[in-house]
Image (cartoon, grey):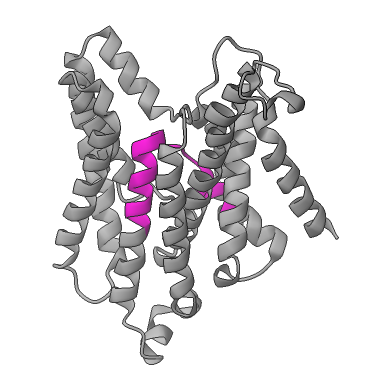
Amino acid sequence: MHKNLIILLSIIIVCTSPFFGQIEISLANILDTNKMDYQIFWDIRFPRTTLAFFVGGILALSGLIFQTIFRNPMSTPFTLGVASGATLFTAIGIVLGFASFISFFAFLGAMLTIVILFILSSRFQKSETSSLLLVGIALSFFYSAALMVLFFISDLQESYEIVRFTMGSLDIVGFDDVYIMALTGILLLVLILRYKYELKLLLTSYQFSQLKGINVKKVNYTLLLGVSIAVGVAVSITGPIGFVGLIVPHILKIIYKQSAEKLILPIFFYGGVFLVFCDMIARNLGTTSDIPIGVVTSFLGAPFFIYLIINKKRE
């Protein structure tokens, strides 16, 4: 019964989200092309809500895959440094005077990181995902150091633009970015559902999966590649939005009490709902401008992250 109530509340949140914001709009006016309400609803709020849903779904599902492959409940979609690479190249673009093309630079940084990771992974033996994880962490530290250099040489306006990107943003006009994210989300979902059986075996153990004839390294790297590309696309459009991939998979496991391979669709759906809900909070705090979405998710995610650490210690 409580699951049905959660589904109902989730649908209500998604359907009503476009109607909330700093400017009140009338339901009767959103179909009248001559009204400002029409422009606000169809050009700004509805695309923004749709974007939030697909980005949230991608990040939540990516978190599930990372936690499964790395066997670490603290893993997130940004563990391999894809977001750090996107942020660094965005900063490079801003400092070079190409602020209008930050999405391109962010995507370039994310893809370059993926290429580096998977070139290096060819040197690993068998299914050494721990080595790939360490490489990702090392890349993140390197990117952070390079980013500090860019902060040092940038002016005040450039520094602000870099910081603003790192906070995440769902500010869009029109559906161009929405189409890209929707296609990316659907393709990621299809890929993970394709490997649903392999995920079930991986959750048991790598040794058991190999006994069942699964090429563990191939499956792991295929999923990580697909997830990393999807995360790279999301970050290039919205910037890094933290904690979605950490919170949602764990909450869904607690609610449904099922293994991960059975939660692929619910995690994608509720990941989208969670980010839509966070966006509603960001747009309705009475401030002169919207709170960056990454700030809201971090406020909700940080305490939960601490809870996971404490709970893991108790176990």
Location of residue 300 with respect to 180 vertically, above or below: above
- Please provide percent x and percent y for residue 148: 23, 24
Q: Residue at x 66, y 25 (%)?
A: 32
Quadrant of residue 92 within the rendered picture: top left
Q: Nearer the viewer, residue 14 or 204?
A: 14
Q: Residue at x 33, y 38 (%)?
A: 236
193 relative position to 106: left or right: right
Location of residue 210 with respect to 239 vertically, above or below: below
Q: Nearer the viewer, residue 195 or 210?
A: 195
Q: Quadrant of the N terminus?
A: bottom right
- Please provide percent x and percent y for residue 276: 61, 38
Membership of 176 in magenta stretch: no
- Please provide percent x and percent y for residue 52: 53, 39
Q: Residue at x 33, y 18 (%)?
A: 161
Boundaries of the magenta span: 227-249
Q: Main secondary structure of the magenta part?
A: helix
